[in-house]
Image (spheres, rainbow, N blue to C red):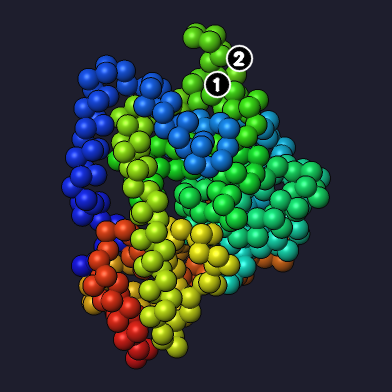
Amino acid sequence: MIFMNDFKAEPQILRDAMMEGVQRVINSGWYVLGSEVQKFEAEWARICGTTNAIGVGNGMDAIEIILRGLEIGPGDEVITTPMTAFASVLAIYRAGATPVLADIDPTTALMSIESARRCISGRTKAILLVHLYGQLCNIDLWQKFCDEYGISLVEDCAQAHLASIDEKCAGSFGVAAAFSFYPTKNLGAPGDAGIIVTGNSKLAEKAMRLRNYGQSIRYYHTDLGLNSRLDEIHAAILNERLKWLNDFKERRQFIAEKFRAGISNSEINLLAKPKSKASHVYHLFVLTCAYRRELQEHLENEGVQTLIHYPVPIHRQKPCLSIERDPLGLSASEKHSNDCLSLPCHPQMTDEDVKIIINAVNSFKVK
Ligand SMILES: *Cc1c(COP(=O)(O)O)cnc(C)c1O
């Protein structure tokens, strides 16, 4: 079976380096917010081209802390997409703000600017822009859009580590950005971890307090924060995995190019080709098919695991049935969630795996 992820197949030297990282931390006797975290924060800020990075517990907390740091809360609206991880929207609720959902562009599954425009109100404070599947798209248009309305652009980069446009990296386009290092992300820890990047030093200082109970100096609390600190063991492992990230990214892009060149089946559509190679890091390779259930079954029989990202759009989730949304509805999101299917696309796949997947997809026929 070709799996969606295969951590045990990672290079032995990487696995050894991760063990050494763990050992380093245990030998140091310092376990939370120490030198490994500082090293990782400095390195991640440099890679993203921002001045500050603040390690936190996970990607969802990163979004919540950014919004609270921007003083976005009760009575304020944040526009985002129903085609995202539940965490994007949950973080807006947890900040006390009101999420408003804009529909997607069906060719990319990314949030549509026209739809977002219909979601703007006097209470709109920010756009939470999700670089879904690893795609950076229309950044200059979103920046203009946010400037036009005087609102903040916040990036959800949980799927877009190292995606770039004109050498500018995901995370450097908005006032702040959230990354997740959940194990399956393009850069993953062996557990939960996340980071905030921002070029705004006041926001960075506030985020550093908020992640640590709202503490300014030890035992003095200026805010009601949360407990969302990055552990040293995770940071040590991230420091090791970081050395491989660029090669892993290039392998994902290579596999995706093979898929694009090789997949040819009239029942199957691919999402739009990215405008430049660097702008898509293929956290997921997604296709659409009107006969998804049958296709998924066929691929399973051919030894190819698949997953659906996402089978239920946010506004169809039980706690969100009356969520605010584009007055014209969210029909493109609904269609995409019915038809989308993610193929395995990870750095441990061999060239043979790639061929097997292409042949399996091309041999699908509707009975
Ligand atoms: C994974 C993910 C998150 C949440 O990250 P966690 O670390 O799991 O909290 C948020 N947004 C998107 C788009 C994600 O893929």
Residue drawn at (34%, 47%) of the image: 244
Q: Nearer the viewer, mark 1 or mark 2?
A: 1
Q: Seen in the image, is 102 located left or right of residue 282?
A: right
* Disc marking residue 231: none
What is the residue that sits farthest to the front in this orientation?
167
Going by the numbered disc 2, the residue's amino acid type is Thr
Q: Nearer the viewer, residue 16 or 108?
A: 16
* Disc marking residue 222: 2
* Residue at image mark 1: 209
Observer able to see residue 56: no
Coordinates of residue 297 in the picture (x, y in percent) = 30, 76
Coordinates of residue 77 in the picture (x, y in percent) = 70, 44
Going by the numbered disc 1, the residue's amino acid type is Arg
Residue drawn at (21%, 54%) of the image: 9
Q: CA distance from mark 1 to mark 2?
A: 8 Å
Q: Secondary structure at mark 2?
A: loop
Observer able to see residue 222: yes
Residue drawn at (65%, 25%) of the image: 202
Q: Are marks 1 and 2 in contact (CB under 8 Å)?
A: yes
Q: Is mark 1 within 8 Å of ligand 1?
A: no
Mark 2 is surrounded, within 10 Å at the Cα level, by few (under 14), some (14 to 19) or many (20 or more) other residues, namely some
Q: Residue 329: which quarter of the image?
A: bottom right
Q: Quadrant of the N terminus?
A: bottom left
Q: Nearer the viewer, residue 322 or 74?
A: 74
Q: Seen in the image, is 108 located left or right of residue 257?
A: right
Sequence-earlier tag: 1 or 2: 1
Q: Is mark 2 within 8 Å of ligand 1?
A: no
**Vertical order, 308 against 241 (above or below):** below
